[in-house]
Image: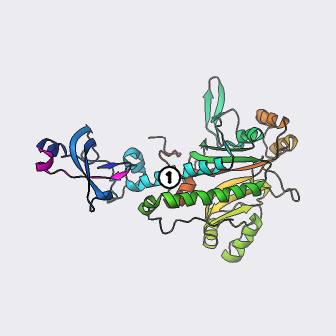
Amino acid sequence: MQDKYGDVQVTAKKDVVGEKIFNQLNLGFQDCILVRGKLKKFAKAPNGVELIPSEVKILNKAPEKLPIDITGVTDSELDLRLDNRVLDLRNPRNQAVFQIQHVLLKSIRDYLCDQNFTEIVTPKIIGSATEGGTELFPIMYFDKEAFLSQSAQLYKEQLVSDFEKVFELGACYRAEKSRTKRHLCEIYTLDLEIAFADQHDVMNVLENLIHYCHTQIKEKCESELKSLKRWETFEVPEVPFPRYSYTEILHLLEKKANFKIPWGEDISTEAYRELEKILPSFYFIPDWPMSMKPFYIMKNQDDPKISQGFDLQKGWLELVSGGTRVHNKEVLAQQLREKKLNPASFESHLRAFDFGMPPHAGCGLGIGRWLLIITGVEDIREAIFFPRTPDRLTP
């Protein structure tokens, strides 16, 4: 018998429990039952105990032939598993992934609240694009066009002027037709923003947050990590994390991987795969070209071609994007125009900068990608309860 705490052996000998209970326990795999009885120590049983039943109730029967094998003996295709996700999540390996997620989310909240952050909740129905571009899901909001939120970015910037240190754990939506093992259309993110701070302050918070969360998972999720065969390799990273500017990364790729990228171009997945051989753990990449960062990122004071934006990588996988934000209304409007965006479309956001907006910085972190790093699953869809992709809207 299995529940959320694991397996319990039910031992029913006819001469001990009686014929009625003995016959009731002629059950199918995944039948839903309630059993009342007496626990006895038994070293050879799961968890060291067995249950001698005194009452059995059969609440629901499962079909004799199930659509997927959840025992792990036979591998089922991921799409078939996702079609039968509720059943798939009874696999102990999959349950381990989401028990770790539970500890991860609690650890995030514990750490940030201890650092005097205030948890916020921002709208997921918005009137204009958060970051520009076309990766938006339009919806009808009564008689107006609206969109599903791309991120909490603009709202958390506004709220930082009221609460100084804020964070949100919530969903956001990207209408990207990407069919990779690391992209989704509905993602769950950690967004945080800090007043009177710059990109370096945010990087400090991030590395200490990750160190704390990994420490908590190592302490509290031993059985889950062992179920995923991650116990020996799971990393509690040392802090501080290394920091290599965008320019230094290009030089590193050319020198150690014979991989040349012209300055100002993005770093490809292939290049990041080469970087993982050189930098397998967590590392920051600050000082990206301004042309590759969104309108709200501040320019470098000495060289306007360079941004005060950063990424956090774990090996080849981008986990975080963040940076110092523009806090001057006129500069922000100018940078909107430079990105071919209309400041009038951001009127309500710009208005917040009329009331003494402090200097601030922040970032966004993908929880699914972080869980992928921790658990070692190969496809981000395995790290989401019910993933949404260009090809999947159910269940």
Report the side of 68 relative to 115 (left or right).
left
Give the amino acid type for the residue marked by disc 1 in the picture: Ala
Q: Quadrant of the C terminus?
A: top left
Q: Left or right of 375: which side holds 192?
A: right
CA neighbours of label 1 inside 10 A, class few (<14), some (14 to 19), many (20+): many
Residue 246, how many percent across, how many down?
75, 64
In this view of the protein, can residue 184 be seen by the observer? yes
Q: For residue 382, say whether it is visible.
A: no
Q: Is residue 141 above or below residue 185?
A: above
Give the residues drawn in magenta, as a range.
4-18
Residue that extends furthest to the top in the rendered view of this protein:
143
Residue 206 vs residue 261, the one in the foreground:
206
Which color mode does the image show? rainbow
Instruction: Say above or below: 48 vs 27.
Output: below
Residue ID at (65%, 49%): 114
* Residue in the picture at 32% in, 56% down: 71
Residue receiving disc 1: 383
> Observer-nearest residue: 107 or 339?
107
How many marks the image carries: the answer is: 1
How far from the left and from the top, in percent, is residue 261?
72, 67
Q: Is residue 27 magenta?
A: no
- Which element is circle 1 on? helix
Residue 48 position within the rendered picture, expressed as x and y whole percent measured from the top left:
30, 59
Q: Is residue 274 above or below residue 290?
A: below
Residue visible at 68% across and 45% down in the picture: 117
